[in-house]
Image (cartoon, rainbow, N blue to C red):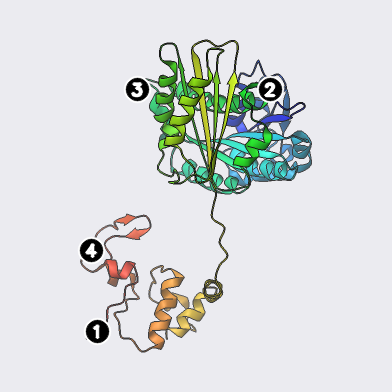
Amino acid sequence: MPEAGLKIKIIGVGGAGTNAVGSIALADLDKVQFAAINTDAQALTKSSIKEQLLIGRAVTRGLGAGGEVDIGRAAAESDREAIATLVGEMDLIILVVGFGGGTGSAAACVVAEIAAKTGALVLAFATLPFHFEGSRRKRIAEAGVGELRKLVHGLIPLPNDVLLQEGEEDTSVLNAFAIADRWIGRGVHSLCIMLLKAGLINQDLGSLRSVFQRRGGKTIFGTGIASGGDYVKDALDDLFICPLLHMGDRPAQLDRVLVNVVGGADLGIAKVNEIMSQVSQRFGSREDIVFGAVIDDTRSESLEICILAKAEMEQRTPTKAENANVAESSTSPLQVLDTLGLETDVDQDQLPQQRAVHISKLLSKKKAVAEGQDEFTFNEEDAQRGYFEKTDRNVYKDEDLDVPTYLRRGIKIKLR
């Protein structure tokens, strides 16, 4: 039986997160609570979500963060107590946020930190910006994902560019953003109905916690939906081609997999076994698969499959040698220059222009010089470019490709 008194709250953070939560329809799950957190007072007034919190009034005057992460973070930090009151004492908290802007990218991490301290299971859905939104928003989003992933038990990133694959070529901008909201709605609905509805195979919060035992690690999410005809096969096909299951950063090996199926009264145990068999073959994990099946009397010849999987980050203690290297790498640049026999007591303007080199390469050079090894050394940046010194730089991933590889990579060439 579903757990009595289970408390679930879905919190939208920032403009995109609030819009996504406002579009989630859970009419059959009235026990689920909704809340919105934002720095934009006008956006909150337009939201249908009843429980709202305007943060950082003294910081933004209710005008939003303007895409600035520092402002968004300051707004959240200034209202920690109010955020803690809104979070309350919940069993499951689902954060919904759009990364790339100022409020969501910063405030979501503050909300997650506060939520985690309550002992609740904290999951998050985070949309990532379209390519056309620019590199700045992309960088902000990537930083936000890295930080938030460490604070929640499961983070489900939803790249808008990937989700747009299911749209038509003439999909409007508004419809393009709405696609991610529909995916979030699918995931939230499947999680809530699994915990709050009785089914053929019941799963509770403990089952969900068994999949998300620790914070951090990568979470895989995908859904498959079909109705009419051979709806079991069609739903499985829809699941297996789900774009979120084929992203480049998907872990090769999963630790735990949760599969939830929602169907009508015509979903018999034979069909459930067929679904389970195929999903197990495709998404087998190192440990186990948690499976749930819910019967929805309003459905007929209809099936929804949701998969959540977790790949834990390996926890490894640094060796003594690694700790020693870290300590050695704290040597100041002036100390390194001194050991290389370079001038350190003259005016910096008189020194030739130095090309940025990673500290590890300078340290390896230090060792080589100490052993008396002869090698080519180039201190002046223009000297390194040789034939290409009069052309524009050809930079890729912060490396000048016109500089010979052995110089860029710090490879030593012995003189004979």
Q: Earlier in the sequence, mark 4 or mark 1?
A: 4
Q: Residues within 10 Å of mark 4 (few under 14, many from 20)?
A: some
First in sequence: mark 1 or mark 3?
3
Other-residue count near label 3 (Cα within 10 Å), few / some / many at <14 / 14–19 / ≥20 = few
Q: Nearer the viewer, mark 4 or mark 1?
A: 1
Judging by the rendered image, the residue that carries numbered circle 4 is 388
Tell me the residue that label 2 is attached to: 49
Residue drawn 59% across the image and 35% down it = 97
Q: Amino acid at mark 3?
A: Glu
Give left or right: position of 126 versus 370. right
Amino acid type of the residue that numbered disc 1 sits on in the rendered structure: Leu
- Per the image, the residue denoted by label 1 is 415
The amino acid sitting under disc 2 is Ile
Cα separation between marks 3 and 2: 32 Å
118 or 56, nearer to the observer: 118
Query: Could you tell me which quadrant the N terminus lies in?
Result: top right
Per the image, label 2 sits on a secondary structure element best described as loop
The residue under label 3 is 169
